[in-house]
Image (spheres, rainbow, N blue to C red):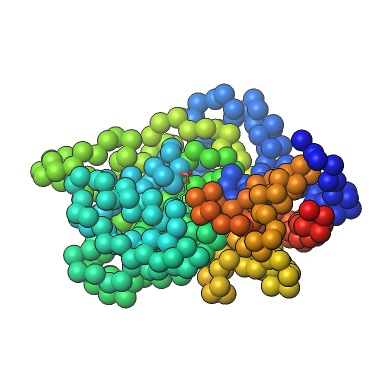
Amino acid sequence: MNDGLQIPASLLPQDGRFGSGPSKIRTDQMAALDEGSTSLMGTSHRKPPVRRLVASIRDGLRSFLRVPDGYEIALGNGGASAFWDIACACLIDHRAAFGSYGSFSAKFAMEAENAPFLDSPVLFSSQPGTYRLPDLTDGVDAYCWAHNETSTGVSAPVSRIGGSARQGALILVDGTSAAGALPVDIAQTDAYYFSPQKAFGSDGGLWFAVLSPEAIERAYSIETSARQEAKDRWIPAFLSLTSALENSRKEQTLNTPAVATLILMENQIRWLNDHGGLDWATSRCEESARTLYDWAERSDYASPFVTDQDARSHSVVTIDLDPSVDAATVVSRLTDNGIVDTSGYRKLGRNQLRIGVFPSVDPKDVQALTRCVDYVVSRI
Ligand SMILES: *Cc1c(COP(=O)(O)O)cnc(C)c1O
């Protein structure tokens, strides 16, 4: 496996996991799994111990994300990808507009395009490495984009599209690789949704959504008319946002969740809140990201992929390498030394490193990573 290139131990990070999701899970989270090995694992998700865990997650998220009064937190199985289909079924009335600037933002738009009961979405696209918010558009009832485009390392602003409230339109923001790492004002959104395996350093499988009163009202109205009057759309029980919400209010999920994921998530939210909440988390990620961007700017073989400084993500950092330095070789030498998941997004196809710097990653380990990359590049 190892071609003999050994990075000196003194240069190595303490923990070599830099994935953009699944991402590093802290050892304390794994210890929490162990502690729950007989009290939580293998017990019913409808009984108090697991329900208390869910309650702690929902309460913890409420204070961590400073959720405004009237908003509610729902969760269910299937990850953010499932939430895209839930949104198509229960939140988009007729037509949505999308900012599309990478793999994840494009995937949600594609779901809306394929939903037979929705009008074709209006797409506002831009090149990978940039972002594009949707413009105010007649006849649109939902505006959708990603806070952080994980495939390219671009972060986009989260603020209501001017005039959209007058239209009665909803703002649906994919916060999957942003929630927990980037600042956000939830009041600017009607649904801010994410999966637990990115900034929350948990395992995958669940989605979480912070829902405004308007989003909740929209879901009830669409689901009621689909069932009783118009019958113009089929809403599978698994994709019903109102049943997810009603289960969430009882600290449950519609169907059986992975209890281990809940334990990891609960531990992480408590850890984040104990250290100072969102401000602490976002400044820690900013420090790590700055280390990488500054290093790349100084380097003679690396440069930040995202040219607009304000759009450079503080959670997923993309660094282009000079064509004379083969990124795949660098990634493979790093992997040989226990530094994993630093390759660029496959479909983007660039000579690039992509590094997840979520709150669980120690900023010191990010510094160590830059030294390891320099070491590897100087020897290949
Ligand atoms: C990872 C990711 C998703 C998909 O999450 P799953 O849990 O795999 O469904 C969606 N959007 C963004 C921005 C992501 O980073």
Is residue 62 something that shows in the picture?
Answer: no
Residue in the picture at 66% in, 64% down: 322
- Residue that lies at the very extreme toward the left in this rendered image: 229
- Would residue 183 be found to the left or right of residue 340 on screen? left
Residue 366 position in % (x across, y down) = 74, 58
- Relative depth, front residue between 260 and 330: 330
Instruction: Judge left or right: residue 93 versus residue 242.
Output: left
The image shows residue 91, relative to residue 227, as above or below, that is below
Image quadrant where residue 27 sits: top right
Where does residue 176 sit, x and y in percent of width and height? 49, 53
Q: Is residue 229 left or right of residue 376?
A: left
Which residue is found at the position 36% from the left and 48% from the top?
A: 84
| Residue at the image position 38 percent from the left and 39 percent from the top | 247
Quarter of the figure that contains the N terminus: top right
Which residue is painted at 42% across and 61% down in the image? 101
The location of residue 85, given as percent across then percent down, is 33, 44
Judging depth in this view, the residue of 96 and 50 nearest the camera is 96
Q: Is residue 302 visible?
A: yes
Residue furthest out toward the front: 324
- In this view, 189 is above or below 80: below
Q: Measured from the top left, where is residue 157 in percent x and y? A: 46, 70
Q: Give the answer, above or below, for where 244 lies relative to 272.
A: above
Quadrant housing residue 252: top left
- Residue 40: image quadrant is top right
Where 118 sits versus 186, above or below? above
